[in-house]
Image (cartoon, grey):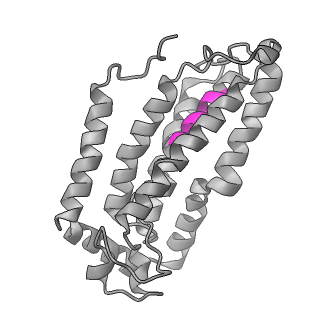
C-alpha cells in the first residue's frame, strides 16, 4: 500500500508549508507584522459601507462548517458510497474531520490570540493588546483567532467536496468547475474574514499554509487501498476519480 500522489510531488512542498507556518508564528510572537495586522484592521473598520459589509457577510457563510461544509460533504459521501457500492467515501469525510479537529482547534487554544473585534466589544481590549499572540486574555474572552478556522477548514473541506463531486460524476466533472469549487471559497474567505475583522490578516495567511499542508496530508492517504474488515468486503470498491 503506497501513499497517493499529490501535486507538486515529494515532501519538499509540505516541509516548505510547515516551515512557513512556524516562521510566521515565530515572527508574530517576536512582535513582527503586528503593525501590518493593525493597519489592515483599521482600514477595514473605516471602509465598511453597508452594502459591501453585508455582501461580505453573505460570502463569509461559505466557511460555516457545522451546517454547511460537514453536511454537504457527508451527503455527497453517502451519495458516492451508494452509487459506487463502497464505504470508502465515508472514510474520507471522517479523515477530514479528524485531521482538522486535532490540529486547528488545539492551535487556536495554544496561541491564545484575540480577534480584531475584541477592541470594539467585550472584553474591549486596546488594539495593540488584542493583536498580540500567546496572549494572557481575560477568562471568557474570545481568544481563538489564530489561525483562521474558516480559511483552513475551507481548504480541506472544499477539497473533499470537489473530489466527491468528481467521483459522483464518474470523473466527468470539467476541470473548470472542479477548480472553482476547490480554490474559490478559501480565497473568498481569506478576504471576507479579514475585511469583516473576524480575523487578522496573518490569521488568514497562517491558515492558508496550515490548510494546504493538511489538504496534502489528507490526499496522500490511499483511500481506495485501505484494508477494511471482512464484513465490508461487498462495500469496499474503489471510488476516487479525478476530472
Q: Is residue 2 magenta?
A: no
The residue drawn where x is 69% and y is 27% is 89
Tally of numbered discs: 0
Where residue 87 sits: x, y (%)?
A: 75, 24
Tell me what residue is drawn at x 65 percent, y 17 percent.
Answer: 171
Residue 35 in the image, given as x and y percentages of width and height? 20, 71
Coordinates of residue 233 in the picture (x, y in percent): 78, 12
Q: Answer yes or no: is residue 211 visible.
A: yes
Residue found at x 58% / y 39%: 96
Measured as percent of width and height from the top left, residue 92 is found at: 63, 31
**Which quadrant holds the C terminus?**
top right
Q: Is residue 161 visible?
A: no
Q: Which secondary structure class fits the magenta region best?
A: helix
For the point 43% across and 61% down, the residue is 108
Quarter holding residue 173? top right
Is the residue 143 above or below the residue 59 in the image? Answer: below
Viewer-nearest residue: 155 or 178: 155
Q: Answer left or right for 234 relative to 8.
A: right
Span of residues in magenta: 156-165
Nearer-the-camera pick, 34 or 243: 34
Horizontal arrangement in the rendering, residue 87 relative to residue 95 (left or right): right
Q: In the picture shown, does residue 168 fall above or below 135?
A: above
Q: Decide if residue 234 is on the left or right side of residue 101.
A: right
| Quarter of the view holding residue 191 | bottom left
Amino acid at each position: 500500500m503506497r501513499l497517493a500522489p499529490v501535486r507538486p510531488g515529494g515532501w519538499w512542498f509540505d516541509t516548505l508549508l510547515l516551515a512557513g507556518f512556524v516562521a510566521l508564528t515565530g515572527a508574530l510572537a517576536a512582535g513582527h507584522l503586528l503593525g501590518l495586522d493593525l493597519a489592515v484592521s483599521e482600514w477595514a473598520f473605516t471602509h465598511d459601507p453597508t452594502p459591501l459589509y453585508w455582501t461580505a457577510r453573505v460570502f463569509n457563510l461559505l466557511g460555516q462548517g457545522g451546517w454547511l461544509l460537514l453536511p454537504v460533504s457527508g451527503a455527497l459521501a453517502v451519495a458516492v458510497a451508494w452509487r459506487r457500492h463502497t464505504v470508502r467515501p465515508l472514510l474520507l469525510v471522517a479523515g477530514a474531520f479528524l485531521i482538522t479537529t486535532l490540529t486547528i482547534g488545539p492551535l487556536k487554544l495554544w496561541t491564545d490570540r484575540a480577534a480584531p473585534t475584541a477592541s470594539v466589544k467585550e472584553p474591549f481590549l486596546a488594539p495593540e493588546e488584542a493583536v498580540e499572540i500567546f496572549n494572557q486574555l481575560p477568562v471568557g474572552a474570545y481568544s481563538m483567532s489564530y489561525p483562521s478556522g474558516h480559511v483552513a477548514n475551507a481548504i480541506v473541506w472544499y477539497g473533499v467536496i470537489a473530489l466527491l463531486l468528481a467521483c459522483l460524476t464518474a470523473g466527468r466533472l470539467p476541470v473548470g468547475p472542479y477548480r472553482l469549487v476547490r480554490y474559490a471559497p478559501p480565497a473568498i474567505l481569506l478576504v471576507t474574514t479579514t475585511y469583516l475583522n473576524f480575523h487578522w490578516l496573518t490569521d488568514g495567511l497562517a491558515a492558508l499554509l496550515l490548510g494546504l499542508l493538511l489538504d496534502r496530508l489528507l490526499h496522500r492517504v490511499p483511500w481506495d487501498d485501505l484494508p477494511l474488515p471482512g464484513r465490508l468486503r461487498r462495500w469496499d470498491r474503489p471510488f476516487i476519480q479525478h476530472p
